[in-house]
Image (spheres, rainbow, N blue to C red):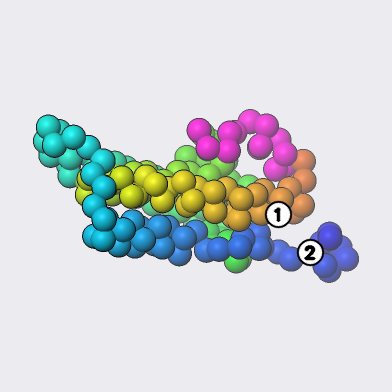
Amino acid sequence: MNEASGSFRDSSNAAVRPPIAWALAAVASFTLDWLYPLPLLPEAIPASWLLGAITFLAGLGLLIWSAATLRRAGTHIQTVQPTTTIVEDGPYRYSRNPIYIGMFLGLIGLAIGFDSLWFLVLLVPFYLVIRYAVVAREEAYLERKFGDIYRAYQARVRRWL
């Protein structure tokens, strides 16, 4: 598969759209918490909703910063569209996947804010889906498309943190 032969598919071919996976994890967590509440924090911790909101907003802020950085660079955010450049600015200086870190923080914020262990339980399958059905495919695609440029970026910047 290479670009010259015409058999190169110019997208990551991710198995799932990350926002859909995130929404499914959140809805499933809320549903499980409604059916079978599983508290996360001891009752002695006051205002857990505030800490949860701060964590959620930090994740949302990271996601927005990351998306804005991609847009400024002129590349696509959606996994079904072609990537036009390797972005190394903003949060991409520290992580190759800051949008997904923002999503993880969002679920952690909901876990704290709604005092529900279910969000953390479902964070595990969400992570596995993102890691293996999305990120692994994105990395293979970027390596095929950008070669040494992407490999050099991989060597400099960690996958997560």
Which stretch did the figure color magenta?
A: 149-161
Amino acid type at image mark 2: Phe
Q: In this view, does 153 lie above or below 35?
A: above
Q: Which of 157 and 19 is in front in this view?
A: 19
Amino acid type at image mark 1: Tyr
Image-based side of 37 in relation to 96, left or right = left
Q: Which quadrant would the N terminus be assigned to in this image?
A: bottom right
- Location of mark 1 (residue): 141
Residue 147 in the image: x percent, y percent? Answer: 77, 46
Location of residue 59 (image quadrant) = top left
Q: Residue furthest right?
A: 5
Dominant SS type (magenta): helix
Q: In this view, does 20 lie above or below 111?
A: below
Q: Which residue is drawn at 24% across and 60% down?
A: 34
Magenta-span inclusion, residue 151: yes
Q: Nearer the viewer, residue 127 or 103?
A: 127
Residue 135 in the image: x percent, y percent? Answer: 60, 50
Residue 101 in the image: x percent, y percent? Answer: 45, 44
